[in-house]
């Protein structure tokens, strides 16, 4: 592992951050076939309410004092991040009800281009040419995975909702990169997941919350809550204290590669040439951002630190 300083942070922290994000995307990829199976029996809002509710209980049980004496600014930042992510997830789900999965995946993937633009405007963060090249490669890979693999016919309203959700995902990535600090990662994750649990419970409450009826379904929900919920939020929040938003977006974009791999192994889905080309582009993009560049700041200063 290389040593040295990039943007005021040791390079090894950057590399560990990238590895953490790779692990996060692999876990997210494993949730696709599981979630697809669970939503056949559970309403989406009810599933999310159970998932995030269990996740926040687990995190608080591990560190009961995690939320004690938190500065008001950290509560506000965590709640805002949770609301942004929850709204993005809700809009994406609504749009997906009317869109082919391929179109939804491509439109959602537009956060790859939005993230560096938002970072440039908001943080005045310079993005290197190599990182822009990685964004381009990942975008081509996303297109190959989605549009070239299925129908491109879609209702304009659903596409617009999905585009808004992509913009919100990009905002969440940039904001998390700006406000996340290693010492705040646990508390910030708890506040975000608590916010998500509240939002999803409110969304599910009007029709009554449906819970899993079998032990197998409960096992799936617990996996989504702990490993793919609490664990990934912690890992992403810590990682983005060391990896700038655009590079993080490129690494996270590799999620469909993992999802496809799990689908091929678990469900025997075929690996077409579009999938192989798309996966190759995404892996190449991830390889580019795996090496930090001096002009990118791995951890922009956080306003939270001023009151911590």
Image: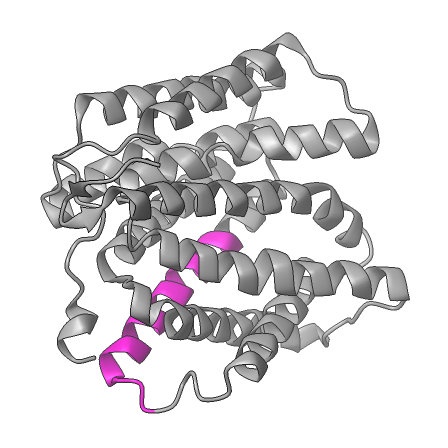
Q: Residue at x 52, y 47 (%)?
A: 24
Q: Is residue 208 visible?
A: yes
Check the image and tell me how it is coloured.
one colour
- Residue 130 in the image, given as x and y percentages of width and height: 24, 21
2 versus 288 height, above or below = below
Decide whether residue 244 is among the magenta residues. Answer: no
Q: Is residue 84 left or right of residue 28?
A: left
Q: Please identify the residue farthest to the left as the structure is shown.
A: 124
- Residue 155 in the image, given as x and y percentages of width and height: 53, 32
- Residue 294 in the image, given as x and y percentages of width and height: 14, 34
Q: Residue at x 60, y 76 (%)?
A: 58
- The quadrant in which residue 55 appears is bottom right
76 versus 133 height, above or below = below
Quadrant of the rendering where the N terminus is positioned? top left
Q: Magenta residues, as a range?
A: 69-90
- Residue 74 in the image, given as x and y percentages of width and height: 28, 76
Quadrant of the rendering where the C terminus is positioned? bottom left
Q: Please identify the residue farthest to the top as the structure is shown.
A: 273
- The quadrant in which residue 271 appears is top right
Q: Nearer the viewer, residue 157 or 63?
A: 63
Q: Nearer the viewer, residue 261 or 173?
A: 261
Q: What secondary structure predominates along the stretch shown in magenta?
A: helix
Q: Is residue 25 left or right of residue 124?
A: right
Decide whether residue 86 is among the magenta residues. Answer: yes
């Amino acid at each position: 592992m290389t040593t040295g300083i990039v943007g005021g942070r040791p390079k090894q922290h950057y590399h560990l951050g990238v590895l953490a994000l790779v692990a996060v995307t692999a876990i997210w990829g494993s949730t696709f076939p599981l979630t697809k199976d669970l939503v056949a029996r559970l309403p989406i809002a009810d599933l999310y309410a159970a998932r995030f509710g269990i996740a926040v209980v687990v995190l608080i049980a591990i560190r009961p004092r995690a939320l004690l004496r938190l500065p008001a600014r950290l509560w506000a930042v965590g709640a805002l991040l949770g609301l942004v992510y929850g709204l993005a997830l809700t809009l994406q789900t609504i749009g997906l009800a009317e869109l082919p999965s391929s179109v939804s995946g491509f439109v959602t993937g537009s956060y790859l281009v939005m993230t560096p633009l938002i970072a440039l405007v908001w943080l005045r963060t310079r993005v290197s040419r190599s990182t822009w090249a990685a964004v381009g490669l990942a975008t081509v890979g996303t297109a190959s995975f989605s549009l070239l693999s299925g129908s491109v016919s879609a209702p304009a309203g659903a596409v617009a909702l999905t585009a808004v959700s992509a913009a919100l995902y990009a905002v969440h990535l940039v904001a998390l990169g700006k406000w996340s600090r290693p010492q705040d990662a646990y508390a910030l994750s708890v506040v975000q997941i608590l916010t998500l649990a509240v939002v999803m419970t409110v969304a599910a409450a009007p029709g009554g919350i449906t819970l899993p009826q079998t032990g197998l379904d409960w096992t799936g929900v617990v996996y989504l809550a702990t490993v793919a919920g609490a664990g990934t939020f912690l890992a992403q929040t810590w990682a983005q204290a060391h990896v700038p938003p655009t590079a993080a977006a490129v690494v996270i974009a590799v999620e469909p590669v993992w999802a496809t791999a799990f689908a091929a192994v678990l469900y025997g889905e075929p690996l077409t040439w579009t999938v192989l080309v798309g996966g190759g582009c995404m892996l190449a993009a991830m390889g580019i951002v795996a090496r930090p560049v001096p002009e990118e700041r791995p951890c922009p200063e956080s306003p939270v630190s001023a009151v911590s």
